Image (cartoon, helix red, strand yellow):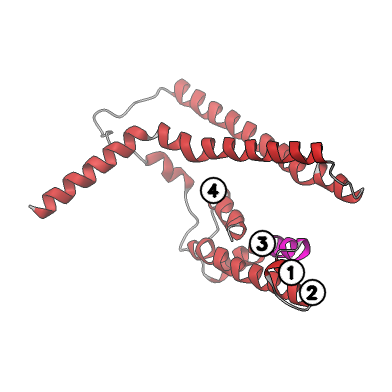
Amino acid sequence: IISSAVLPGALSLLWNRQSKWAACLSPPLGLACSITAWLVTTKTKYGTITVETSGSNIPMLVGNVVALCSPILFVPILSLILRDKAPYDFNSMKEIKRDNEDSENTLNLTSEELEHEVNLLTRNLNIARITAIVLTLCLIILWPWPMYGTAYVFSKPFFTGWVIVGIIWIFISFFIVGIYPLFEGRHSIVSVIKKMFQDLMTYRN
């Protein structure tokens, strides 16, 4: 359901020529293609579509692969056909100000401080890229493919460990992605809610 949004979401940050229509339409088109591929594979392989047959490994694999890869076609085609007036200028993000920031109290950085900030961001970006590539290779290729190629059968202790590691990984991801950003932005969230409430009361009055 969500795999078809991975590539458009990533390209929204990495490719300034992806149009807004490509970013918006590629996920639902990929979803439609993945569901079609999933059900057609189920019907072709097993002759009938049931909860059991549609939940089999091959149909599920085909559906997920189509969902993940179909935007590779949709994004460039839609970006060419439904172009934006101009490529997105990522430098405009530098002009975004905080809600409590104005022209009088804007932090003025020296050229040395600005260069240090840019170098720090570049370093963190490189760390994130390397980490993402290494984890992708390990978790998608180097770990599962040899097990599949050797037809490895999980023993009970190994399977128990596999499930435990998976559950721990999910909870860590949930706290990092779901909880920590809320905690980090708690002051901004409270500020926005207060201002929304103030606007609502002003509108009623």
One can see residue 182 in this view = yes
**Residue 9, image x and y in percent?**
55, 53
Residue 72, disc: 3
Distance from the alpha carbon under mark 1 to that under mark 2? 7 Å
Disc 3 vs disc 1: Cβ atoms closer than 8 Å?
Answer: no
**Place of residue 151 in the rendered image (x, y in percent of width and height, measured from the top left):** 90, 50
Tag 2 and tag 4, C-beta contact below 8 Å? no
Q: Which secondary structure dominates the residues rendered in magenta?
A: helix
Q: Which residue is mark 1?
A: 53
The magenta region covers: 57-67
Q: Is residue 110 above or below residue 168?
A: above
Tell me the amino acid under the disc marked 3.
Ile
User: Residue 70's x, y, as percent?
Assistant: 66, 65
Of tags 3 and 2, which is closer to the observer?
A: 2
**Is the residue marked by circle 1 packed among few (<14), some (14-19), or many (20+) residues within 10 Å?**
some
Q: Which residue is mark 2?
A: 46
> Residue at point 76% right, 42% down?
137
Image quadrant in which the N terminus is located:
bottom right
**Badge 3, how many Cα within 10 Å: few under 14, some, many 20+?**
some
Q: Is residue 71 magenta?
A: no
